[in-house]
Amino acid sequence: MHQLTLAEIARGLADKSFSSEELTGALLARIRSLDPSINSFISVTDELALEQARAADARRAAGESGALLGAPIGHKDLFCTTGVRTSCGSRMLDSFKAPYDATVVERLAQAGMVTLGKTNMDEFAMGSANESSHYGPVKNPWNLEHVPGGSSGGSAAAVAARLLPATTGTDTGGSIRQPAALTNLTGLKPTYGRVSRWGMIAYASSLDQGGPMARTAEDCALLLQGMAGFDPKDSTSIDEPVPDYSTSLNASLQGLRIGLPKEYFGAGLDPRIADLVQASVKALEKLGAVVREISLPNMQHAIPAYYVIAPAEASSNLSRFDGVRFGHRCENPKDLTDLYKRSRGEGFGAEVQRRIMVGAYALSAGYYDAYYLKAQKIRRLIKNDFMAAFEGVDLILGPTTPNLAWKLGAKGDDPVAAYLEDVYTITANLAGLPGLSMPAGFVDGLPVGVQLLAPYFQEGRLLNVAHRYQQVTDWHTRVPTGF
Ligand code: GLN
């Protein structure tokens, strides 16, 4: 049963080949036996899952239907879940049990999804390797010596290892798309505002966006359908109707205009990844797409701008974890300053502390104009580049990552080396655009992803192109040895 996609599970539950309780029990057993080797879960919610599964079976028996009713899901451990630890991968929140559900969690639960647990992640979603979690690193099921990507590394590894069919992730600079690429999944970062951020612990509020991670575009469409939509509790949520993503999945690609930014294919890109990207372009041309070169001239400024804006917002968002209002509190503080210093010093890991310091510096009087304001101006130029490009093409295609999944620990002492891995993904967050990564082949047994970017609210187009591509390729069906 663990090999089934969400769409297949929906059919199996509908025709009564198995019940949600049977499926849930089988997957929980699989998590128990296999997760110790990859560490993709922070919490497994056995009892809650079985209870939800029985409730879903009862709803179905009473005549309800729905593609997600009784289907399993895991949530990245920054989506608040009532009564269950929501740690954000940090010692700071190790004992935090949320008193409410995030909107995403609530909506998927209403659709009848069964929560198997909370997945491992980089601490406060900062990272690209899932090595900064307080609960230990996550390993890539394709090669246990390699990282799965981050920060939604647990969400990615769990699905890749067939511990469950689907998970939620969040993407501030690539954290859905990059781990999806490195573990052979399909991952979608929606348009900023498409999916509610309410109840998602904030990293950088103007960039964060939740989205689905699964094996196929078809499954991502089912999940996005359940997650998306206006939420009055999130002031940046957008009140736009949610289209039916499943009906556009099979639309023809005849005449679809795809742009390849020339800046994507320069030095820094592993040539073996470039070859696989070209092969995916050929496959899409065969399906009717018309491909041409475009330019995104300000792309080289994206990493420096992002690594000012994201830490600036993080330094502000994380100020609430002070040992008084929220988070870990040190033992026997001498006075208030000691309480703050030691609570934050003990609660936050090294990468989070680094980002808070960088962010607070960039926002401080005298440096604000030179760093933060400058970065915001670059952000606008990057958005303008995309707007100009989308006058001539419908979609932009390129690699998701410049390199393959690296070995655990390989970039440990060099944070900037890890930051550079985000070069293809962070521009979509800076501009607020939707992006999808899909499996496109292997190099040395490690998966390679291709990224598609679309204009605002064109998630349906991304899913359509990825689905058509997955009808003519079988990369997404490959299973890592041992799983
Ligand atoms: N790697 C990026 C960072 O560390 C992106 C992380 C994310 O999208 N959450 O900030």
Image (cartoon, rainbow, N blue to C red):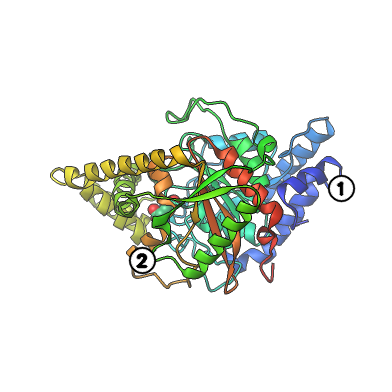
Q: Nearer the viewer, residue 119 or 182?
A: 182
At a point 47% along the width and 69% down the height, the residue shown is: 271
Count of numbered circles in the view: 2
Q: Secondary structure at mark 2?
A: helix
Give the image location of residue 272, x and y in percent. 51, 70
Give the image location of residue 182, x and y in percent. 54, 62
Q: Quadrant of residue 205?
A: top left
For the residues marked 2 and 1, what is the alpha-carbon distance in whole angstroms? Answer: 49 Å
Query: Closer to the observer: label 2 or label 1?
Result: 2
Residue wearing tag 2: 417
Q: Is residue 128 visible?
A: yes
| Residue 17 circle label | 1
Q: Is residue 101 visible?
A: no
Q: Nearer the viewer, residue 394 or 309?
A: 394
At a point 80% along the width and 35% down the height, the residue shown is: 60
Left/right of residue 470 with respect to residue 317 in the rendered view:
right
Query: Can you say which quadrant of the picture contains the C terminus?
Result: bottom right
